[in-house]
Image (spheres, rainbow, N blue to C red):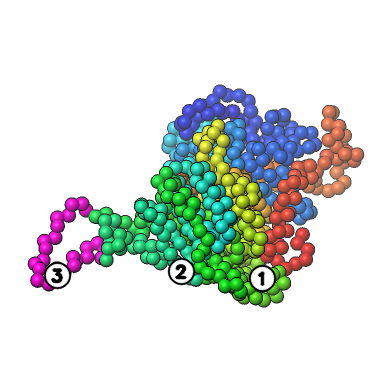
Amino acid sequence: TGNSKQQQIKSPNPTHRAAPRSHHAIGETIFSSSRPSHHNNMQGEHWDVTQSEEQSGTRISFHCWPSSRLEATRCVAPIGALYTPLKKLPPTFAPPSALQYDPIRCSTATCHAVLNPYCQVDFRTKLWVCPFCLTRNHFPPHYAENISETNLPAELIPQFATCEYELPSVPPAGPPAFVFCIDTCAHVEELAELADSIQQILNLLPEDSLVGLVTFGTNVQVHELGFEGLPKAYVLRGNKEYAPQRVGQLLGCGGVAAGGGAANGGRGGPGAPPPPPPPGQAPQQPPMPQQQQTHETPGQQVLRRFLLPVSECSMTLESILDDLRKDPWPVPSDKRVARCTGCALSVATSLLDLALPRRGARVMMFVGGPCTSGPGAIVSRLKTEDIRSHADLNRNAEPLHKPACEFYAGLSKRHNASGGSNAKGKGGSSTQAAANASACSMHVVDVFACSLDQVGILEMGELVEATGGHMVLGDSFGQSVFKESLRRVFRTFEPDVPEDGGKMQMAFGATMEVLTSREFKVSGAIGPVTSLNKKGPNVSDLEVGRGGTNAWSLGGIDPNTTIAIYFDISNPGTSPLPEGKRRFIQFLTKYQHSNGRTRLRATTLCGPWYNLPQGDNAPKSAPPPGAAGRFNANMEQPNPVKMSFDQEAAAVLLARVAVERTATEDIADVL
């Protein structure tokens, strides 16, 4: 890679001037021990396998890869990477703040890689070569006019293998929304503890964040927080599923004029004729219009009445929480309480689908027992019928399990209309295929279950995982486990963090794409991901986890979300790779920040290949002076693939494969 100049950001312009100083590019110094550098990952015969986590938020099982598929199979441990997309990196390895312009991307239709420090740049002709598809690309005019060896844009500075862009081409979506769904079938003491916790959370939210409230028991109550004077709620039957359009009609959000019509209790829509005069009375002249009526969509009416900023409805919401009462419907002694958890989820997600289809939001479900009524029920109300057990599931003797799974999986894809279908997969179940059909999920579903009994997490798990939500199990809403877990969802960045200080760490609608150089392919990913079914030349036929694609939907993510990506070395190895050949990986993560802006993070990795020496009868030469200790007793240099092994990363990658096979395959030996 040769020498380059170390750069320092000194201006907000796309290019940054810096004083020249001799420095080796990252692509060489991370993996080479022949030239000393403070970026070096290899010291003597030992590799610093943990340094990549600080530099790029990644851990790789092998930092030096075998150059052929046969040698890769002998490694036993999977070849893969653990990637944390939102990890905050020190300013020495990434720009301290997001770059306020769109990235420069490769012109090849099947590539579209982002400009990075490993691209070869011809400063004379103003061209750059993509390291993934080797296509020559022209710089745009505003780059070509200013770029030089001493004036590089941030994405070409050697240390900045990770760059984050705040995309001006995508309009801001606005602050996130939070819909709290509260189970009123819980005991009175539990409701009081839960109400106190939610009131504390309201004080942590930014004032412009939107909030809504849904309570449920036998029926579902949608509280109109924008109604002044007294508490007002719409009651919906809890024994059926509601589509978004139907919810809008039942709530009086029919898309009529703001000054009258059905939304305000009127009988007619805009433009309806006036009522006829009483008998014997002359018709009155229509009054002159004082103000032209404004028409509102159903989503705008939901935002005006049911989803309001915290600063406008905090007093109303706190008064409703203080007056929460247990579900008033009587419960016979031989029956369970009627709890319509599934119906409440469908109503809450419908509210968000109507009002905020492309804005980040969370549905926070607080349940105190199993769903017994309506869609998603997992047990009958009759106490003579026991809740499903492992034995029932193994014998397929539980009639409510599969319909409940299909219902919750259907919710995960209902507000992701752009998703495709992926019936393929090792699990082969229809519910798994339905969950995989979701695309970019902007609305996250969290489930906080505090009960000594089962609540149906097994059935709801697909919905939570497909949207990137959290599942928390506890015994009581008064436990510190629940209270601390709820607070952690709303964590904010430290005040001293550039640009993001004090903002919430959560992000929404995340998607991840993985690009690779030609010698290897992507086998799949394991984690809170669903396939986007994006085919490409770097997609392997050997599937691991969610395979058959190089792009996934992550839904909601935070700085602790880590994805495992597995690779398949496709090079046949009939001829060794050229010496000095490098492999390249690029992770492209697009997400909606908690401030409503859309960001793209590009992380590019570079590493060496190892060609196995040809023949075993090669003469053994004496070690060079000063190299004692780096050679074994047979005067052979240790295999760099073995020396670059990260056992912690490999253990996590292998454990995720085992858990995935447990859930999708009926085998005894998951390893």
For discs 1 and 3, the disc positioned in front in the rendered view: 3
Which image quarter: residue 453? Answer: bottom right
The amino acid marked with disc number 2 is Arg
Q: Residues within 10 Å of mark 3 (few under 14, many from 20)?
A: few
Other-residue count near label 2 (Cα within 10 Å), few / some / many at <14 / 14–19 / ≥20: some
Q: Residue at x 64, y 48 (%)?
A: 480
- Identify the residue under disc 3: 278
| Image location of residue 123, percent across then percent down | 52, 33
Report which residue position mark 1 lands on.
388
Instruction: Find residue 53 and report its image quarter.
Output: top right
Magenta residues (range): 268-292
Residue 237, numbered circle: 2
Kind of residue indicated by mark 3: Pro
- Left or right relative to 466: residue 306: left
Residue name at image x 43 percent, y 35 percent: 142
Furthest residue in direction right, as rendered: 633
Task: Answer left or right for 64 relative to 439.
Answer: right
> Which of disc 3 and disc 1 is earlier in sequence?
3
- Rounded to the nearest angstrom, the CA distance separating label 1 from label 3 is 65 Å
Q: Where does the image place residue 581, in percent across and percent down from the top left?
A: 68, 43
Rendered position, 203 above or below 6? below
